């Protein structure tokens, strides 16, 4: 079993920055591909960014490209650096992980393990 835990959410003014962290632990027999999704109030959950199991490839939704950066350390910890935040970035942010090798993994069904989410609120 794999546990996924996010942290780092909070309240920030428009134009500000936040960094989210996500740690995967448990029976990680090999490295995990990981991604970030978000669910704005009253809307469905949507893809934000993904990173391959070795950190060599990244992929972003058009809405965050150039503002958000996904990265990972040598373990199964992933970061989402969010700059130039906008009110429309307000959402519950989820981290997801999977042992699959295909990349990019853009759909929810491509991830087996999910965190509980961390709230990001951007005020105007």
Image: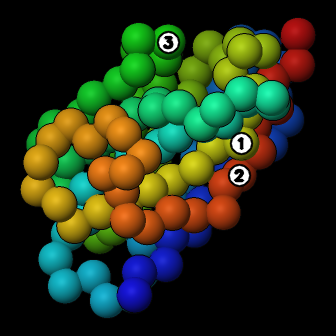
Identify the residue at horizontal 63%, vertical 43% (top origin). 93
- Percent position (x, y) of residue 32? 25, 65
Answer above or below: position of 30 versus 101. below
Give the number of the disc on residue 63: 3
Closer to the camera in the image, 26 or 10: 26
Residue 110: horizontal and vertical position, in percent?
31, 51
Label 3 residue SS: loop
Q: Position of residue 53 (x, y in %)?
A: 18, 57
Give the crowd class for mark 3: few <14, some 14-19, many >=20 residues within 10 Å: few
Q: In this view, does 91 lie above or below 73?
A: above
* Callout 2–callout 3 Cβ contact below 8 Å: no
Earlier sequence position, callout 2 versus callout 3: 3
Q: Is residue 34 visible?
A: no
Residue 105 is drawn in which quadrant? top left
Could you say whether the residue bearing mark 2 is in a helix, strand or loop?
A: strand
Which residue is painted at 20% across and 48% down in the image?
A: 52
The color scheme shown is: rainbow
Of the numbered discs 1 and 3, the one sitting upstream in the chain is 3
Verify CB contact (< 8 Å) between mark 1 and mark 2.
Answer: yes
- Can you say whether 7 is above or below 45 in the image? below
| Residue neighbourhood size for the residue with mark 2, other residues' Cα within 10 Å, grouped as few (<14), some (14–19), many (≥20) | many
How far apart marks 2 and 3 lie (CA) works out to: 19 Å
Mark 1–mark 3 distance (CA, rounded to whole Å): 16 Å
Q: What residue lies at 38% left-to-right and 65% top-to-bottom? A: 112
Q: Which mark is residue 92?
A: 1
Q: Quick one: label 1, few (<14), some, or many (20+) residues within 10 Å?
A: some
Which residue lies under the disc numbered 2? 118
Q: Pick whichever of labels 1 and 2 is earlier in the sequence.
A: 1
Q: Residue 79 carries which label?
A: none
Q: In this view, does 79 lie above or below 91?
A: below
């Amino acid at each position: 079993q794999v546990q996924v835990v996010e942290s780092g959410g909070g309240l920030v003014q428009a134009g500000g920055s936040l960094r989210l962290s996500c740690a995967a632990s448990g029976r990680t027999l090999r490295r995990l591909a990981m991604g970030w999704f978000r669910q704005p109030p009253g809307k469905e959950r949507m893809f934000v960014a993904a990173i391959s199991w070795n950190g060599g490839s990244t992929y972003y939704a058009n809405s965050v490209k150039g503002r958000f950066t996904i990265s990972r350390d040598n373990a199964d910890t992933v970061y989402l650096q969010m700059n130039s935040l906008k009110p429309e970035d307000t959402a519950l942010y989820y981290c997801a992980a999977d042992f699959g090798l295909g990349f990019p993994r853009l759909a929810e069904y491509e991830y087996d393990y999910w965190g509980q989410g961390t709230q990001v609120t951007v005020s105007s």
